[in-house]
């Protein structure tokens, strides 16, 4: 979806954001967006590492001999 925006599209989005929010709010919005992306990235890394750790902790399955 965002692959074909291009430079003119990004410039247009930035100009519209500047008109809507004003020059004083844009840095705050950028910081909040950056923090959100950072937290999302760290949370996904944590989930992936947790899944990897659980896979290594699982014992190997072995056959159980039944006494008859």
Image (cartoon, rainbow, N blue to C red):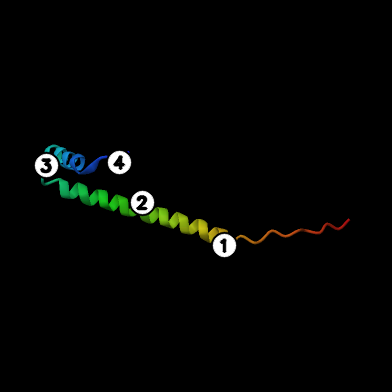
Residue nearest the observer in this picture, 11 or 26: 11
If you read the primary sequence from the N terminus, does the residue marked by circle 2 or circle 1 appear first?
A: 2
- On-image quarter of the C terminus: bottom right
Residue 7 image position (x, y, % from top left): 20, 44
**Foreground of the two, 5 or 40:** 5
Q: Secondary structure at mark 3?
A: loop
Q: Residue furthest right?
A: 68
Which label sits in the foreground, 4 or 2? 4
Residue at image location 26% in from the left, 48% down from the top:
33
Q: Specify the label residue 56 is tagged with.
A: 1
Disc 2 element: helix
Q: Which residue position is annotated with label 2?
A: 40
Q: Earlier in the sequence, mark 3 or mark 1?
A: 3
For the residues labelled 4 and 2, the Cα–Cα distance comes to 19 Å
Point out residue 28 in the picture as x, y percentages from the top left corner. Answer: 18, 49
Indicate the secondary structure of the residue bearing disc 4: loop
Q: Are marks 2 and 1 in contact (CB under 8 Å)?
A: no
Establish if 1 lies above or below 66. above
Q: Label 3 to label 1, Cα distance in Å?
A: 51 Å
Q: Check disc 4 and report the residue beneath it.
A: 2
Q: Earlier in the sequence, mark 3 or mark 2?
A: 3
Residue sitting at x 64%, y 61% = 59
Residue bearing the label numbered 3? 22
Looking at the image, which is closer to me, 5 or 46?
5
Q: Is residue 65 left or right of residue 55?
A: right
Q: CA distance from mark 3 to mark 2?
A: 27 Å
| CA separation in Å, label 4 and label 3 | 24 Å
């Amino acid at each position: 979806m965002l692959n074909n925006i291009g430079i003119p599209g990004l410039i247009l989005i930035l100009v519209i954001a500047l008109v809507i929010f004003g020059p004083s709010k844009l840095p705050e919005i950028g910081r909040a967006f950056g923090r959100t992306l950072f937290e999302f990235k760290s949370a996904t890394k944590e989930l992936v590492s947790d899944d990897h750790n659980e896979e290594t902790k699982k014992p190997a399955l072995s056959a159980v001999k039944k006494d008859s």
